[in-house]
Image: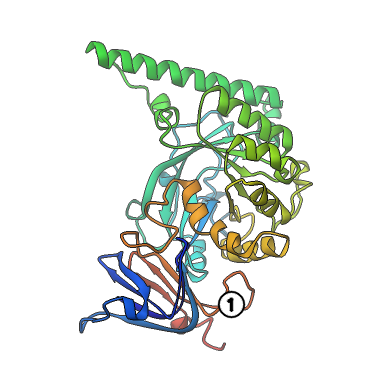
Amino acid sequence: MYIIGGTIKTMAGTDFQDGCIHIENGKIAEIGRRGEVDFHPAAHEQVIEVRDGIVMPGIIEAHCHMGITEEKKGMEGDDCNETVDPLTPYLRAIDAINTMDAAFDDAVRAGITSAMIGPGSSNVVGGQFAFVKTRGRRVDDLIVKAPAAMKVAFGENPKVNYSGMEKSPSTRMAIAGMLRQELTRAFAYDEKKRKAAQNGDAFEEDFTLECWLPVIHGEIPLKAHVHRVDDIFTAIRIAKEFHLKMTLDHCSEGHLIADELSKEGFPAIVGPDLASRNKIEVQNMAFKTVGVLNQAGVMTAITTDHPVSLIQSLPLCAGLAVKSGLAMEEGYKAITISAAAICGVADRVGSLEVGKDADIAIFDGNPMEVFTRTLYTIIDGQIVYDGEQDPEEGNK
């Protein structure tokens, strides 16, 4: 496949006017200006000609629950929170993602080619997130990285869910204490397993603790649900105590402590700001947060937290962040390469570079503007959405 013409935003430091991309075997084989790429399509190869549009990496949703909290399904389609035990690190998102959820089609039509999907925030430890592509029937075939993060939650949600059950946690102190206890168990288990391997001793694996090893070995981060300033600092305190990687998800009051967060070095996934302030802990959420954090030097991505805000609104959320102070180029990064880096998959997606997955979105303008149409969505070198063939776009 070849894509020729338009403005190619590679998100790798170089843009190409009237560019050309050559795709082979689902990967980007060549990219550059039209005259710089060897353009000799075989008889069977598709050629997409773009006139005035923007060709860019497929958009990335860095935190959502699509396919786990299905639309219009009620309890039958809600697999987001196992609210009987506040510590469930062994749960895996891939066992609950229903790719038949309508949100996957909505994502593809919006140019969103991949997403970080996982459990919700009712538990202190919710389980393992997975980073997946957005088109296909079998989730096993869509996986880019799994596990990709371990969900932990601070503040209001675990308190609300367990305080009425006459069991912990009912305070923020208990949330932090339970997480510390769980991490201490995980580190002790890892040490015991390591010594057994060194000594050649038999070792019986514990399913409820094996899932922590990628976290404590630094392979994947904690994915911390934090809104309020105090919860953000508690999450950082614990991550530093145990020397763990972590992302600050939602980070609704991050703009109030931007300089402090810049010094700490943890990235932030901000949102969902296109939603009501329906909880006490989100009273200070605002579209300006991502811009204030970014200007302070914090690596930032933007989330819809689907279905809290609809997945297809992600590029518009980036546009509203730009309107509220985020630099335009940083708006593009927040839904492409920065999101990929924060999710630990920048070697595969997030920018248009030779050797990376051919996940590409083509728009007739800036995707952060409300009237912009998606012309094509391409995943692994295959056209999965053609705007000209979409009956909902046919009258436009």
Q: Is residue 66 visible?
A: no
Please give the residue where the numbered disc 1 appears in the rendered image.
372
Q: Nearer the viewer, residue 90 or 224?
A: 224
State the residue at coordinates (70%, 40%).
259
The amino acid sitting under disc 1 is Thr
Instruction: Locate residue 143, reporting x and y percent.
Output: 36, 51
Q: Is residue 129 visible?
A: yes
Instruction: Locate residue 123, reporting x and y percent.
Output: 59, 34
Q: Nearer the viewer, residue 30 or 340?
A: 30
Apparent side of residue 1 relative to residue 107 in the rendered image (left or right): left
Asked if 220 appears above or below 25 in the picture, the reply is: above
Asked if 382 appears above or below 391 in the picture, the reply is: above
Apparent side of residue 70 relative to residue 229 in the rendered image (left or right): left
Q: Nearer the viewer, residue 238 or 126?
A: 238
Q: Nearer the viewer, residue 273 or 236?
A: 236
Asked if 15 appears above or below 70 in the picture, the reply is: below
Asked if 324 appears above or below 383 in the picture, the reply is: above
Residue at the limit of the structure toward the bottom, as seen here? 395
Looking at the rendered structure, the secondary structure element under dot 1 is: loop
Instruction: Locate residue 2, reporting x and y percent.
Output: 32, 77
State the residue at coordinates (25%, 79%).
45
Q: Tell me where residue 168 sits by quadrant.
A: top right
Instruction: Locate residue 276, reporting x and y percent.
Output: 74, 55
- Classify 10 Å Cα crowding around label 1: few (below 14), some (14-19), many (20 and above): some
**Quarter holding the N terminus?**
bottom left
